[in-house]
Amino acid sequence: MASFRLAVAILSIFSLTAATTIPLSSSNCNAFYQVASETAAWGNSVGTLTFKNYIELEFDFTVTATKGWWTNVFRIGNDDNTRLPGAYMAPNAEYMNIHQTLYYSSYTSWYPNDNNPSISLTSSSMVGSHHFYMAISPNKIVVTFDGNTQTWAGSFDRSNYVGTTQNIYFADNAFDSANVVFSNICVRTSSSSLLSDSSSATTTTSSSPVSSSSSLPSQLGFDLSVGLQDDPLSASEIVEVTTSSLLNGVRYYKFYGWDTDHDIAAAIIAKNNDARIYIEILPGLVNDLTSTQVASFVETWDDLSNYIYCIALGNEPLLNNINMDVLPTKLNLVYSEIRSHSGWENVMVSIPFSQNIFDVTYPVPDSTFKSSYKSVLSSIIGIYKTYGAPFSINIYPFFVAPYLPDLMDYILGEASAAGDYSSMLGAQYMATYYAMENVYGNNGVEIVVTETGWSTYSSTYDFATTSNANKYYQNTLRLMEDSTSEIYNKRIYFFELFDESKKGGGDWEQHFGVYSETGSLKLDISGSAFTAEDEGTSTYNATEIALIVIAILLIITCCSVAVYFKYGRNKDSVTFDHSDIKVNETPVTNKEETTNDNNKTEYDIEEIEVDMEIETNE
């Protein structure tokens, strides 16, 4: 049987003797289920797991003796109707099988037969030490056993178990303590993604498979809209960008309902079979949305259904004249319609909200939604929980900057400015979490940041520069990979991939692109040596930079000496403890809106709430 060597980064988490195949940290495992070791026993339930669309399981085990009958290595699920693929050892431990069980509606039992296909993971004796990893996603199952990988591809119906809580069993029916010992058991579940790219590493069905050489975080996405460009980029021109050395590892793209979206998405997928797209039902349709309209939407996108991660039901309801009260009904309507179509069983539906839904965001743990929306938002979160969908929120620290210039480093996410939270984006992310908990406790719904970004030019705001945009994006990328950060391994979409010169609102609106309107890279979002086209700033060569640095150091030295002799011996010093600065983390409480022909909202800042306490240490 063919096998493939799994080409993924190796991360040793628990000093494993075998290679760990998923980049899980101990904190991620602890959020779900982790034990140091587990000895086999009858009825051996070692924990529970709430099923979501993506599940990862990893463990080590040692077999010391054989049995004369089939034995259960592990299974997750209380019965056959809600059981995940499990591993079962053959009589006398000649090999171990993974059975697909519930993925086939015609299966009759957990053991292998024509209705329950399985794969054999080894053809020699199982006696000895082994390392096992399994990744389950809507479109495939990947199993890596002692470094060899097998993959099932297809669209799997998981509606029977998503949202249910099931037992985790390890060796519960035939082993005893003399036969097998388990260790380093780690289970993770998610509404939207795997922590590794392992589920995609072995699938190369596209004619031009893309290597994941990009150093960008695996959870990074980009908002992609060219409908408001003066001369919109073609699908082929966009693909030149998405397959560049910078972006060729990026999987996630969000669209905004333009007529060209389908063709652009198809072109991206043709070059990157691992791409996953977030598509939109136009805001102007939401209030009176019908099943017929949803069916038409499904027909348009049906050929790409396996690549659709989520559908946006409108965008920023409070800025697009969407009636909040109809949203739960319309959300259920879309789910009901798409679930009736083959291939759409695992597509999720979410509503990207602006921060206008917040009432209080300081202190962050006391954050709440506006009282008039709490009931509706509770219902929406309940629907998300049922279907395993994420809560989508657009977060822009950029719009705080005009009012808190002294906190610019914190707004930009600079490490030196971190306090109780790693950055303003991190604090706003947590404000969303606490507000959700306030209306629906223990909801377990994932939060996805569907928009965040920084404009590179404005005649009004001097902080809208390429330099600050570079800092914001690079700091956000750093924090997405920092296990101590609030946004560690969170799905975040950068707004936006390209500039759009025909956008309304302030002149900053036209310059949020990481790339220019012609497809040229503006920013250094990777932290490496990409050339940035600064809008309004100069660039220098290495020699010039060295001379500038030397000059600055000389000036600082001279000034320091002068200050010391003038003030140092006679004045008491005053210092500011930046960790005591408290900020209302909601950047925009009101926006003056304009709506373009595609119901894509643009806005100016009208009002902002700021709450600061500054203490000095004298």
Image: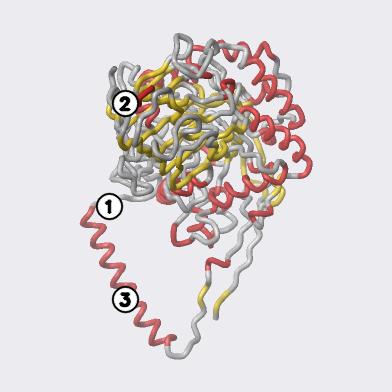
Residue 161 appears in the picture as rendered:
yes
Image marks 3 and 2: residues in contact by CB distance under 8 Å: no
The one of 85 and 405 positioned closer to us in this rendering: 85
Image marks 3 and 1: residues in contact by CB distance under 8 Å: no
The alpha-carbon separation of the residues under discs 3 and 2 comes to: 51 Å
Quick check: 430 left or right of 485? right
In this figure, which residue is indicated by the disc labeled 2?
210
- In the drawing, what numbered circle is on residue 529? none
Instruction: Pinpoint residue 15: horizontal percent, then vertical percent.
Output: 34, 49
Q: Residue at x 48, y 35 (%)?
A: 170
The alpha-carbon separation of the residues under discs 3 and 1 comes to: 24 Å
Mark 2 surroundings within 10 Å by alpha-carbon count, few (fewer than 14), some (14 through 19), many (20 or more): some
Label 2: element kind: loop
In this figure, which residue is indicated by the disc labeled 3?
557
Q: Residue at x 29, y 27 (%)?
A: 125
Q: Residue at x 68, y 33 (%)?
A: 317
Q: Is residue 78 above or below residue 549?
A: above
Q: Quadrant of residue 596?
A: top right
Mark sitting earlier along the chain (3/1)? 1
Q: Residue at x 52, y 79 (%)?
A: 574
The one of 388 and 166 positioned closer to us in this rendering: 166
Residue type highlighted by circle 3: Thr
The one of 599 and 206 positioned closer to us in this rendering: 206
Quick check: 575 left or right of 324? left
Instruction: Pinpoint residue 613: horizontal percent, then vertical percent.
Output: 63, 66
Q: For the image shown, how many numbered marks are present on the structure?
A: 3
